[in-house]
Amino acid sequence: MESTTATVKPQFSQAAQAEIARLFTHYPAERRKSALLPLLHIAQAEFGGWVSPEVQDLVAETIGILPIEVYEVSSFYTMFNLKPVGKHVLEICRTGPCMLRGSDELTANLERITGAKVGGTSPDGLFTLKEVECLAACGTAPIVQVREKYYEQLDTQEAVDAMLNELRNLVHRPLLPWEETGLQHTQQ
Ligand code: FES
């Protein structure tokens, strides 16, 4: 029996399309593949913080390359999420200097507080925990990155609580790359 389930093909919004057109002006037409990383960032922000296979196919179509060329890149870089994520993705550095400054304890603490396991999302949907390699801020280890912001010296409970409380009070949507940088806070 023929399936009646239709998959809706994702489409970029007009704002995203305008940004993509602007992005492509930075590359010669024959080198447009070089825009793949920024285009994936636009797609991830546009479609809820992750890039599904359908979204990656749209990226391939938009840039004029094979889907496998997109999959190869998206699965290599940890900044691209290949499954749904929570409102905030906490990228916990686990490389040597951060480990020596307590990143294992920080990870265990964040798992305990949020109820999420590394690679998963908290039951309230607010936090996804990921472990990543050096974030180039070893001098203020241990570090967590959330989108464009670094939370540093998270070796005290006060610092961890302050980070989580700040995130809980933020507008619950990822910023689009072409929007003003900086995290926006909810109206009180
Ligand atoms: S080792 Fe964590 S920022 Fe470098």
Image (tube, rainbow, N blue to C red):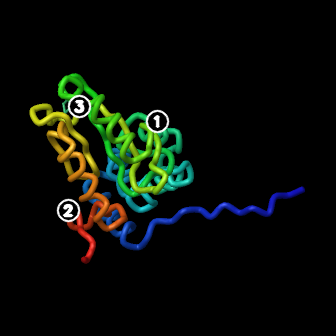
Q: Is mark 1 within 8 Å of ligand 1?
A: no
Q: Where does residue 117 sit, x and y in percent of width and height?
A: 44, 39
**For the residues bearing labels 3 and 2, Cβ distance under 8 angstroms:** no
Three-letter code for the amino acid on which mark 1 is drawn: Glu
The residue lying toward the viewer, choosing from 177 and 131, is: 131
> Which quarter of the rendered picture does the C terminus lie within?
bottom left
Q: Residue furthest right?
A: 1
Work out whether mark 3 precedes mark 2 in sequence or the reverse, and give the earlier one: 3
Image location of residue 37, percent across then percent down: 34, 46
Mark before the other along the chain sequence, 2 or 1: 1
**Mark 1 surroundings: few (<14), some (14-19) or many (≥20) residues within 10 A:** few
Q: Which residue is mark 3?
A: 134
At label 3, counting other C-alpha atoms closer than 10 Å, the crowd grade (few under 14, some 14-19, many 20 or more) is some
SS type, badge 2: loop
**Residue 72: which disc?**
1
Tag 2: residue type? Thr
Specify which label sits upstream in the sequence, 1 or 3: 1
Q: Nearer the viewer, mark 1 or mark 3?
A: 3
**Quick one: 168 or 174, which is closer to the camera?**
168
Give how far apart the Cα atoms at labels 3 and 2 are: 23 Å
For label 2, the crowd category at 10 Å Cα-Cα, with few meaning under 14, some 14 to 19 and many 20 or more, is few
Give SS at disc 3.
Answer: loop
> Dot 1 lies on which element?
helix
Ligand 1 is located in which of the four quadrants?
A: top left
Taking the image as drawn, is residue 31 in sight? no
Q: Which residue is mark 2?
A: 181
The spot of residue 124 in percent (x, y) is: 46, 56
